[in-house]
Amino acid sequence: MADHPLAGEHHPSPASSAATALGPLLLLPSELLHEILLRLAVPELLRVRSVARPLSSLISSPDFRRLYHLSSASSGPGPAAAWLLLFKKLPPRDAAIRGFHGPSGRWFRIPVSAILAPAVPPGEDLYFLAASGSSFLFAANGRRELVVVDLTARTARRLPPSPLGPRGTSSWRRFGLKLVADPPGSNRFRFLFAELVNNTPFLFEYRSETDTWQQSETDTWQQSESVLAEGNSPASPDGTYLCAAHAGADCVMVYSGPGADERPVFFRPRFPHAAAGAAAGHGDRLHVYGDGSAAVVRSAAVDDPTSRARVKVVTGVELYGFGAVGGDWELVASVPGELVEGFRKPYAVMTGLLAEREGVVRLVLISNCRGAWDLVWLSYDRARGGEWRWVPVPDWGGSKGLNMAGIAVSSTFSRLWPLAAPPASSSCGGRQ
């Protein structure tokens, strides 16, 4: 399946021809025209805006942007305002992020090579860490530093080293970091990551507004656990959960409240015995952590008739959460068996990504079997009575032998208004 270019780039079709083709659309009643435009993905809106001048003012207007945001937020759980973003390891001059938009069921190519060029030297090895709003965060392995791309301003800059000093790409753990647009809708952001340093958990936070790092640590484990045992407190919806360390079911969690004067809370939650692992013959377990939730993916080994080798297949997925900060893991829901059967494919290795926003938990499972990658996107909507959905993710044609260099889910990418159009000389590739 070919990539669709991100709107705003140069295309061979003249703008005048495109505007002529859109002529019948411009004759529709305004209510129907709004209904059509609200169903488009952000890249498609920007493409329409760039080739149809009569629609440009409508799409860019505050009223339409407000309606689009409201429509995206209420259009369903999994794919509503969320994008699945994937970075394929390529030379910086060819760097691009693939973005899958659930409602349209299509992949879009988001070029970042021209933006990265001033901040990243040729030959640098990049890894995609996180995304929020217009900010995309990369780790540069050669220079051992962080680089942030602002899609709205079309700029890239290097962040100062963290208190832990320069770090290579292998030092960053997906479960222990988070990028947050702050305030929402702006190009300012906070980047948080948690880490065990000499067996002591630390929370590090970078603020783009001040271009500075802060760090917080806790006391001994015994003191932390005894304090939490006296009385757990509910978490604020604006707080942040990170996983400072994990080894299967054993993990060290950190909760950071929204207040600037609140100290982070570190704790070691425990799973119910049945979800703890494979020690008692319960089969293989993959534990995925994110935003105060944990997914336990159960698998079983089977014989692959094609390769005559042993492979694994998913047999069940369970979602866990906290009743209060400092508490143990509690079972929230299990993925229905009929959904599991829909994505039950053989795999050799698997990893995952878990994120939650506005009451919707999104789980992405990335697996590989004989060099081919497979992506499974599940969503769980708390507000809709615990509804599970499976969002089929098609192959764009480049997953065979894919050297994946980072994946993220962003529910704020659809709120990029306006994306600055690149120069007319920019070009967009197709499938890669």
Image: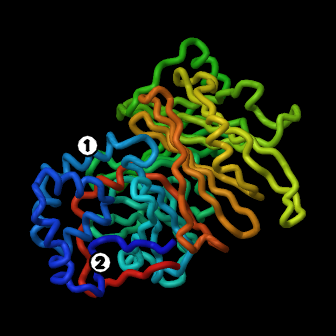
Would you place residue 184 above or below residue 398 in this image? above
Task: Give residue 400's position: percent from left, percent from top.
Answer: 65, 73
Task: Give residue 33's position: percent from left, percent from top.
Answer: 17, 57
Q: Is residue 290 left or right of residue 18?
A: right
Would you place residue 286 above or below residue 157 in this image? above
Residue shown at 54%/54% (left/top)?
A: 392
Q: Amino acid at mark 1?
A: Leu
Bin the neighbour count of mark 2 within 10 Å (Cα to Cα): few under 14, some 14-19, many 20 and up.
some
Q: Which residue is mark 1?
A: 70
- The picture quadrant where one finds residue 17 is bottom left
Which residue is nearer to you in this view: 82 or 28?
28
Q: Which residue is mark 2?
A: 9
CA distance for labels 1 and 2: 27 Å
Residue shown at 53%/34% (left/top)?
A: 292
Precedes in sequence: disc 1 or disc 2: 2
Which residue is nearer to you in this view: 105 or 420?
105
Residue 247 in sight here: yes
Q: Are marks 1 and 2 in contact (CB under 8 Å)?
A: no
Q: Amino acid at mark 2?
A: Glu
Residue shown at 30%/71% (left/top)?
A: 7
Task: Give residue 69's position: percent from left, percent from top.
Answer: 26, 47
Instruction: Work out which residue is located at the far top of the displayed protein and give it.
Output: 230
Which element type, helix, strand or loop, lies under badge 1?
helix
Q: Is residue 217 left or right of residue 120?
A: right
Task: Give residue 339's position: percent from left, percent from top.
Answer: 62, 42
Bin the neighbour count of mark 1 within 10 Å (Cα to Cα): few under 14, some 14-19, many 20 and up.
few
Residue 245 in sight here: no
Would you place residue 403 above or below residue 71 in this image? below
Which element type, helix, strand or loop, lies under badge 2?
loop
Q: Is residue 179 left or right of residue 201?
A: left
- The picture quadrant where one finds residue 310 is bottom right
